[in-house]
Amino acid sequence: LARQMKGCLFPGHPHASMGIDIEHKHAKKGGRTEPKSEDPYLRLLVKLYRFLARRTDAKFNQIVLKRLFMARSKRAPVSLSRLARQMKGRTDKTAVIVGTVTDDVRLLTVPKMTVTALRFTENARKRILKAGGECVTFDQLALRQPEGKSTVLLQGPRKSREAERHFGAPGVPGSHAKPFVRAKGRKFEKARGRRASRGYKN
């Protein structure tokens, strides 16, 4: 029996010997292959860029497709001021944002730009058009520049979300995580570890 059971893959069996785990029936691959959203317009864009990613050798289309799959928290908005800063000296190119373009009241003059995005806020669109620029959709971009030539792919700052500030353990030495606390008063999380008179201070 021992000879028969040698090399068996049942851990804990008295006659089992070390084997290689080759049973991956339920192993999941990371990463998305489609968006979670049921938005029909987004789904059509995915269909279009899946085709372009398959039929062209351009890395641009593969990146756009991957970003179309992303969660909204990963598609951070890009403000007009960031856009103007990134596009300085690149007026002949098209800015491409797989996300939202938002207005920035701190930017006094908007330069002339050609911008492609999933969405523009009302004021952002007005200001781009008023400056003589252009707001292009992704299906229009696919017709104009199917390989993404003379484009600049941009992303917003993902870590700027309020939720990101709370990630980590607040109160631990060296941690800058923001605590979920009602107020910053004397009687809120100001005891041990927060004052030298109460044990120690971080």
Image: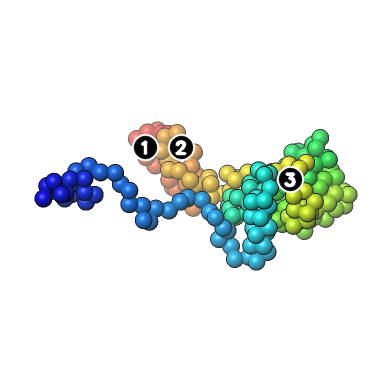
Q: Nearer the viewer, mark 3 or mark 1?
A: 3
Circle 3 is placed at which residue position? 148
Residue positioned 77% across, 58% down in the render = 122
Sequence-wise, which precedes: disc 3 or disc 1?
A: 3
Residue 118 place in picture, x, y as percent:
70, 56
| Nearest the eye: 13 or 90 | 13
Residue 91 place in picture, x, y as percent:
83, 40
Circle 2 is placed at which residue position? 175
Sequence-wise, which precedes: disc 2 or disc 3?
A: 3
Going by the image, does 132 lie left or right of 27? right
Residue at mark 2 to residue at mark 1: CA–CA distance: 19 Å
Residue at mark 2 to residue at mark 3: CA–CA distance: 42 Å
Q: Amino acid at mark 3?
A: Gly
Residue positioned 11% across, 50% down in the render = 1
Q: Secondary structure at mark 1?
A: loop
Residue 174 place in picture, x, y as percent:
45, 33
Sequence-wise, which precedes: disc 2 or disc 1?
A: 2
Q: Secondary structure at mark 2?
A: loop
Q: Nearer the viewer, mark 2 or mark 3?
A: 3
At label 3, counting other C-alpha atoms closer than 10 Å, the crowd grade (few under 14, some 14-19, many 20 or more) is: some
Residue positioned 42% across, 40% down in the render = 171
Circle 1 is placed at which residue position? 198
Q: Amino acid at mark 1?
A: Arg
Q: Secondary structure at mark 3?
A: loop
Residue 89, relative to residue 110: is it above or below? above
Residue 119 in view of the camera: yes
| Nearest the eye: 39 or 180 | 39
Residue positioned 63% across, 47% down in the render = 62
Residue 143 place in picture, x, y as percent:
78, 54
